[in-house]
Image (tube, rainbow, N blue to C red):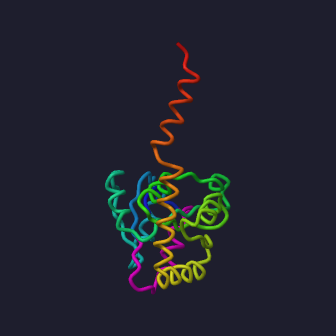
Amino acid sequence: YSGRVGKDRGLMEIAQSIQGLENVRFEIANSGNVSFEDEFMLKLFEYPNVFSLGNLTHERCIQEMVRSDLLLAFYNPDLIAHKHPNSNKVFEAMMLKIPIFTNFGTSLSDFVVKHKIGIVTEYSRTEIIKDTIRDIKRNKSKLETYGDNAQRLYIEAYNWKKYANVLRKIYIKHAIY
């Protein structure tokens, strides 16, 4: 996970869910934290298989993502602001061929299911999250398929070259001389 470490990102739920699972590491690169979240962060990193990578540059986050099996993008579906998340990390994961691990109740989950680019589970039901992670560990080939789908989608629909041309046409059409 990379981004703001907060109570509304499902981080504690993931930390609790992976307890007792062998060979599961939850690595977090945090940014944008404010002091009221310090106590939350301390509790989060008490879990034995949750690790802080600290505050990393964007380039360093990308380097760390490459080593990942999944990229976490959980959003509290009870918050209106989380109904339609549009996170850069999702597109970065797609670019890097890494499946997204998200939760139901957001437009992101619909996107992930529609394009078969990751795994979707419950937001706060730790036993269901744990079962989902166990299933992922048993079916690693799913991760490869989702990663392939994600990278293909990124190349075909979300790459910069494609959008650079779209933006160029818009600017030319609406240019004021």
Q: Quadrant of residue 108?
A: bottom right
The total number of labels drawn is 0
Question: Range of the magenta residues?
Answer: 7-26
Give the image location of residue 79, x and y in percent.
Answer: 66, 57
Q: Let me know if residue 122 is in the magenta part.
A: no
Q: Let me know if residue 8 is in the magenta part.
A: yes
Q: Residue furthest top?
A: 177
What quarter of the picture does the N terminus occupy? bottom left
Decide if residue 46 is on the left or right side of residue 120.
Answer: left
Decide if residue 147 is on the left or right side of residue 124.
Answer: left
Q: Residue at x 50, y 71 (%)?
A: 145
Q: Residue at x 38, y 79 (%)?
A: 48
Decide if residue 86 is on the left or right side of residue 19.
Answer: right
Give the image location of residue 91, x and y in percent.
Answer: 49, 54
Give the image location of residue 138, x and y in percent.
Answer: 48, 85
| Image height of 158 relative to 174, above or below | below
Q: Residue at x 46, y 79 (%)?
A: 140
| Image height of 50 relative to 5, above or below | below
